[in-house]
Image (tube, grey):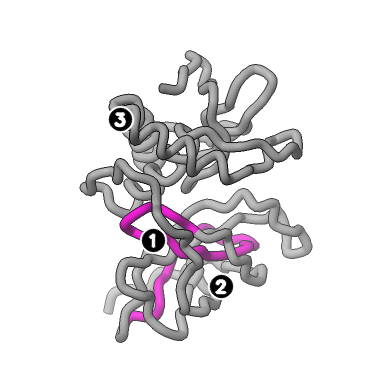
Amino acid sequence: MPIFHPEGYCQGLSGRNGNLTYETTDNGTIFFNFKMPADPNTPAQQTVRNDFRKASQTFESLPKAKVDAWNYEAAKRKKRNANGQMRKQSGLAYFVQLSTKFLLVSPSGTIPQDPPTSEFLGDVPVITVTAGSGKLTYNANVPNSVGVVTELVYERLANGNRKPGKKYKTGAYFAFVLGTLSKDVTVPPGYYAAGYRFVKVATGQATPVQPLPVGQVTMAIAKKAA
């Protein structure tokens, strides 16, 4: 099981899941963003922390044969760390990466104990986004496949000329279906880089983020009651 430092360090993991960042440094791994959010105890932050802890504890309880299977699958995959070096993943890191995403899309589900047997290549919808009054509206051209949801992400920018830094926040996990091919995500006024990725519900596997154009969200005007 990873070791949590009182100030937020966790040894042995690095990556990003939802709005949680955990990056390897010389002193271990930072559990959250280097820049702590204004309110680190929002319900969303608490959910991610709890899912992270649950996934770590589940891995610790796995039989050796299953741990070996996760280590074997993880060894096939390399990830770039904070220093730009390509390193092999541990079975723990790979398990937590998928399990926390699984719990975010299936909060009441049982974490899969076996690693996926095949790669997840994504889904068929093409997503576009429109910036409007107090919201980003994501539109799909066709429904998601059964067992796949779309993670709608965004990053607020200082101005319209800034390029996104890939520090996306999750606005929603949403399954587009016939009759509901649009989803609004409420955000404050400002410039936003939006994006999306597909998540396989059964395993927590996710595709890389597909970036979308930058748009400006204006202030929402409340309508007066008649």
- The region drawn magenta spans 180-206
Q: Residue, x 28% and y 52% (percent of image)?
A: 106
Point out residue 184 in the picture as x, y percentages from the top left corner: 42, 70
Sequence order check, earlier mark of 3 and 1: 3
Looking at the picture, how far across and down is residue 18, in whole percent? 47, 48
Q: Position of residue 185 (x, y in %)?
A: 44, 64
Q: Is residue 119 above or below residue 220?
A: above
Q: Quadrant of residue 84?
A: top right
Q: Nearer the viewer, residue 134 or 94?
A: 94
- Looking at the picture, which amino acid does disc 2 mark? Ala
For the residue labelled by badge 3, is the local secondary structure a helix, a strand or a loop? loop
Name the residue rendered at 46%, 62% in the picture.
Answer: 120
| Residue at the disc numbered 1 | 200
Tell which tag, 1 or 2, sits nearer the viewer. Answer: 1
Is 126 drawn above or below residue 30 in the view shown? below
Q: Which residue is mark 2?
A: 131
